[in-house]
Image (cartoon, coloured by chain):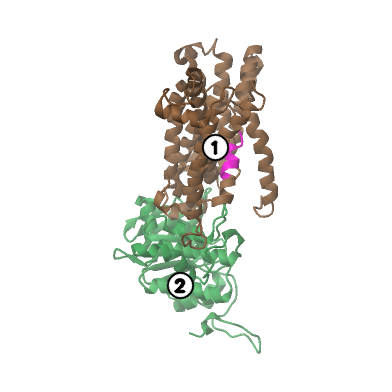
Chain colours: A green, B brown
């Protein structure tokens, strides 16, 4: 379990996240939603150990502040929103960086094949020899996810769950790959790991999240199952839109929901 | 450094797509050979000619060896003049190239160089201070260190600059690379201004010394100097293989490197101190030798990719080779006089670097 208690983050004297209590359980996909500038990414960065924060964050009972980088790396992997690269690495070289901490959890002989297997998971078979900088934005995002998956290849290590912290993992993906990536996240949770993902697509969130945490002006304003959290009132007060949950468009206006995917 | 059992020829073993490690090992293996040949040729060539075979057989079998044996005079020239010079050239070339590669990894910028953040300027200030003020204000210092005063002052100058930089750029245990770059430019300007004041104060004889020192030369290499700067450079170079994996992770950004389990702050600290030591020691002996730190890693990245586990050792080897070749040009092209080696590296390195930029323009998005 990732357990944040009374976490506050100030950047340049301005409070971005205020007194947030947040938990993410193993076996669940926890989605963080909220409008732009509501503190979602800042909260995730505090949970990742990137930013100084007040309060307490614990992963599997260990205080995050007391963990060495290599120890934290064995418990959680982090996908940032965007990654720019300084040098011309190949896709395989990027993905192998996920193994630098040495705790993928894969069997000793398997480590060599992990880049291929991770690429297959994100629908990028045969991309290992390509240069990262020559890929499209969506392909780069999936390569980074493959790297993150290699870092915590087994969702459970030494009997303890591990976590994926994903900052907008599907933001630049087409609908097919949004579904593929969210399936990967849900599969990771089903196999005993925990997933924390910042998402913007509320339909996708409703479909995949076991729990939704809503951030609004730096505070956690709602927390619970999608069916309890997503309400007309929430859309109005948090997102500032008078939108009705579950209302169909009028007449012959076409619409496509991820929920309609054949499975 | 090279794992013999894994050194193969590309194509002979099955190489996974996107895996350049086999090629990288082959290149490193080849560079070891090139370095040995270059060093032997450097030893044998010069105003007093001896064959490379003669040099080696003299070492192996002593003066009694057959027809190719060296005269006593040649032996003195080779063992006491050329050998320290070749060793020094190889050490400094390796130090400059590896320092460049480490700085580029640290700053995530293929154009970063120790000269850029003021380390070289700080070293120069130390050295110029000794040349100009050695007989007056700094007399106690020069009396204490004798012939080693100049190298030592340059080394201290580089180290002090780096420590000031590090203090300015570090807040709450986090070193900001951007602040360090900007502060480095300011410190370099300040060090150059102070150097300018010293040059203004210098007399004619000192001016000539200064000019030659600033242009760079390996002519002053002695066993004594190697004894001082050799261990510093060797220790700094020996530290870099431990930085390789961390520098690779840093290519994805500091936050991601931290997520991957790299102790980023410690990595930066070790990298900066190692570079300051290596560059300070190099500038101390040879003065300003430019472009090795930028051209060598850049060339190797085109050849074997940016993986620092291979890039750092390959840079050391190619840096050594290039500086030996540059020195060979410097001491033969206007023989019996000698050209400062910094002129040679700049003449070759400048246009070469521009050519790389023009060729890669659009691809690199520079």
Q: Position of residue B120 (x, y in %)?
A: 57, 30
- Residue occupied by mark 1: B321
Residue A239 image offset from top left, x and y in percent: 57, 70
| Chain of the residue that carries numbered disc 2 in the rendered image | A
Part of the protein shown in magenta: B290-297
From the viewer's perspective, tell me whether residue A232 is left or right of residue A152.
Answer: right
Main SS of the magenta part reads helix
Whether label 1 touches label 2, CB < 8 Å: no
Residues A81 and A114: in front is A114
Residue B294 lies in the magenta-colored region? yes
Residue at 45 percent across and 62 percent down: it is A148
Read off the residue under disc 2.
Answer: A184
Answer yes or no: are tags 1 and 2 on the same subunit. Answer: no
* Residue B189 within the magenta-colored segment of the rendering: no
Name the one closer to the observer, B335 or B122.
B335
On the question of residue A247 being in view, the answer is yes
Q: Considering only vertical position in the picture, is B2 above or below B193?
A: below
Give percent across and percent down for residue A21: 40, 62
- Residue at 54% over, 37% down: B321
Most foreground residue, B216 or A142? B216
In the displayed structure, B157 sits above or below A10; it is above
Along the horizontal axis of the image, is B122 left or right of A110? right
Assign the N terminus of chain A to one quadrant of the image.
Answer: bottom left
Query: Please, what secondary structure does the residue beneath circle 2 have?
Result: helix
Identify the element where label 1 is drawn.
Answer: helix
> Can residue A222 be seen in the rendering of this structure?
no
As rendered, which of A196 and B128 lies closer to the eye? B128
């Amino acid at each position: 379990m990732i357990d944040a208690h009374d976490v506050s983050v100030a950047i340049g004297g301005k409070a971005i996240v205020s007194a947030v209590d947040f938990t993410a359980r193993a076996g669940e996909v926890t989605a963080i939603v909220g409008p732009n500038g509501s503190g979602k990414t800042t909260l995730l960065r505090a949970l990742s150990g990137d930013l100084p924060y007040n309060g307490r964050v614990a992963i599997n009972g260990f205080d995050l502040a007391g963990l060495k980088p290599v120890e934290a790396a064995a418990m959680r992997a982090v996908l940032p929103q965007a990654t720019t690269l300084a040098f011309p690495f190949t896709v395989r070289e990027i993905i192998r960086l996920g193994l630098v901490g040495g705790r993928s959890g894969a069997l000793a002989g398997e480590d060599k094949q992990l880049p291929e297997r991770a690429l297959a998971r994100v629908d990028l078979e045969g991309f290992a020899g390509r240069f990262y900088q020559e890929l499209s934005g969506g392909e780069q995002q999936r390569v980074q996810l493959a790297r993150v998956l290699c870092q915590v290849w087994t969702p459970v290590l030494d009997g303890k769950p591990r976590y994926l912290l994903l900052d907008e993992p599907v933001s630049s993906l087409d609908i097919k790959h949004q579904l593929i990536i969210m399936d990967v996240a849900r599969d990771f949770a089903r196999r005993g790991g925990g997933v924390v993902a910042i998402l913007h697509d509320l339909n996708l969130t409703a479909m995949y999240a076991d729990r939704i945490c809503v951030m609004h002006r730096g505070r956690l304003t709602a927390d619970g199952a999608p069916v309890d959290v997503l309400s007309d009132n929430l859309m109005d007060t948090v997102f500032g839109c008078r939108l009705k949950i579950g209302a169909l468009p009028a007449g012959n206006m076409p619409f496509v929901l991820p929920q309609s995917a054949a499975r | 450094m090279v794992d013999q059992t894994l050194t193969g020829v590309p194509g002979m073993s099955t190489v996974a797509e996107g895996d350049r490690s086999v090629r990288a090992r082959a290149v490193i293996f080849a560079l070891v050979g090139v370095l040995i040949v270059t060093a032997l040729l450097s030893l044998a060539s010069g105003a007093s000619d001896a064959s490379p075979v003669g040099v080696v057989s003299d070492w192996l079998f002593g003066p009694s060896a057959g027809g190719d044996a060296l005269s006593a005079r040649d032996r003195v020239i080779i063992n006491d003049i050329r050998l320290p010079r070749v060793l020094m050239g190889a050490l400094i070339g390796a130090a400059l190239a590896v320092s460049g590669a480490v700085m580029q990894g640290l700053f995530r910028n293929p154009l970063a160089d120790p000269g850029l953040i003021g380390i070289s300027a700080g070293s120069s200030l130390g050295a110029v201070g000794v040349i100009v003020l050695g007989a007056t204000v700094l007399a106690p210092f020069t009396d204490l260190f004798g012939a080693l005063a100049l190298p030592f002052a340059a080394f201290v100058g580089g180290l002090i600059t780096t420590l000031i930089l590090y203090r300015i750029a570090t807040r709450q245990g986090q070193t900001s690379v951007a602040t360090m770059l900007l502060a480095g430019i300011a410190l370099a300007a300040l060090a150059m201004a102070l150097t300018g004041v010293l040059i203004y104060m210098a007399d004619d004889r000192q001016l000539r010394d200064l000019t030659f020192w600033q242009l760079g030369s390996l002519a002053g290499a002695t066993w004594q100097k190697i004894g001082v700067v050799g261990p510093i450079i060797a220790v700094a170079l020996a530290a870099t293989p431990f930085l390789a994996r961390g520098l690779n992770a840093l290519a994805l950004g500091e936050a991601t490197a931290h997520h991957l389990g790299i102790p980023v702050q410690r990595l930066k600290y070790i990298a900066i101190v190692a570079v300051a030591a290596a560059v300070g020691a190099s500038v101390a002996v040879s003065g300003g030798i430019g472009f090795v730190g930028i051209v060598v890693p850049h060339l190797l990245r085109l050849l074997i990719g940016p993986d620092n586990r291979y890039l750092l050792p390959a840079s050391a080897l190619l840096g050594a080779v290039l500086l030996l070749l540059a020195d060979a040009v410097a001491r033969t092209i206007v023989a019996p006089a000698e050209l400062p080696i910094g002129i040679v590296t700049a003449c070759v390195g400048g246009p070469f670097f521009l050519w790389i930029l023009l060729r890669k323009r659009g691809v690199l998005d520079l």
